[in-house]
Amino acid sequence: MAAKQLQVQKKRELQKKEEATIPARVFLPNADIYETADALTVILEMPGVEKNNVDVRVEDDVLTVQGRLDLSKYQGLEPLYTEYNVGHYSRSFQLSSRIDQNKISATMNDGVLSLTLPKVEEAKARTIEIR
Amino acid sequence: MITAFADPLETLFNLQRELEARIASGWLRDLTASEGPFPPINVFQQGDDVLVVIELPGIDKSELQLQAKENTIRIFGRKTVAYPERVSMHRRERVFGEFDRTLSLPIAIDPDGIKAEYRDGILAIFLPRAEHDKPRTIRIN
């Protein structure tokens, strides 16, 4: 057998309290979150979403990312063999008060959205000298 | 797992995935042979031709290779996810590593017409059907 096989998780569907008016399904994009001394970075994988179809907004301390797919590309195609679901993406995160919401920045490349959430000055790590 | 209702297609997808995870070679003579279920592949039919769509977000094109032989397509490479040295990971959901998948199609492909495009994390491979393989309508006298 080959070395450790990569497993693919099935796409998790977004659980919403309200019903949607459009028939497309919405899934949770995979996220990696890491923290450095100055900021929190959230990386979201949204394959198939173009840069101008991404909506990032902060409201009431909740950061919501929505990525829409161009489903017209799938028109006229008949599925022969399918392994994954196709749909839009959406994920929300609760931001702590340690994040400076005005300085949030985002970049997107190859379907991967990278959000940088800088920490408020007081929350940045401080090194303490030992005398 | 709590679900509101059982979607029969979801069960089939799960079964497919479980089977994929167990085979290292194509002993099932199934449509695909791979080292694992990554990356997920969807195969569509567009008229007479075939379109293969693969989700591979954040991959470097130099680490992705495509080979075509007779009626099989092989996609292999490595997806790397690199983060700066001194970070504290809070969540890790992205899948990364080496992958190697082969797709055998039940139709003959015209190798010169194969086109592949990688955009926004989706690798789309267009496989035109070989002329000699297209069904011909026969008139009945």
Image: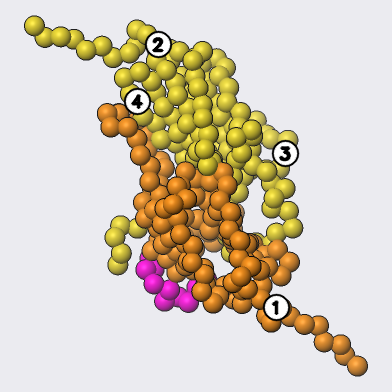
Chain colours: A yellow, B orange
Mark 1 vs mark 2, foreground winner is 1
Pair 1/3: label in front:
1
Q: To which residue does mark 2 refer?
A: A120
Q: Neighbour class for label 4 at 10 Å: few (<14), some, many (≥20)?
A: some
Tell me if I can see residue A78 in this picture: yes
Name the amino acid, label 1: Glu
Residue B21 in sight in this render: no
Residue, x 39% and y 72% (percent of image)?
B25
Q: Are marks 1 and 4 in contact (CB under 8 Å)?
A: no
On what subunit does the disc labeled 4 rest?
A
Which secondary structure, mark 4? strand
- Disc 1 and disc 4: Cα gap in Å? 56 Å
The residue pinned by badge 3 equals A22
- Chain designation of label 3: A
> What percent of the width, then of the height, locates residue A75?
73, 53
Disc 1 and disc 2: Cα gap in Å? Answer: 64 Å
Nearest the viewer among B24 and A51 is: A51
Q: Nearer the viewer, residue B106 or A62?
A: B106
Q: Is residue A38 left or right of residue A69?
A: left
Asked whether disc 1 touches disc 2, contact meaning CB atoms under 8 Å apart, the reply is no
Residue sitting at x 53%, y 58%: B41
Q: Are marks 3 and 2 on the same chain?
A: yes
Badge nearest the viewer, 1 or 4: 1
Q: Residue at x 38, y 63 (%)?
A: B35
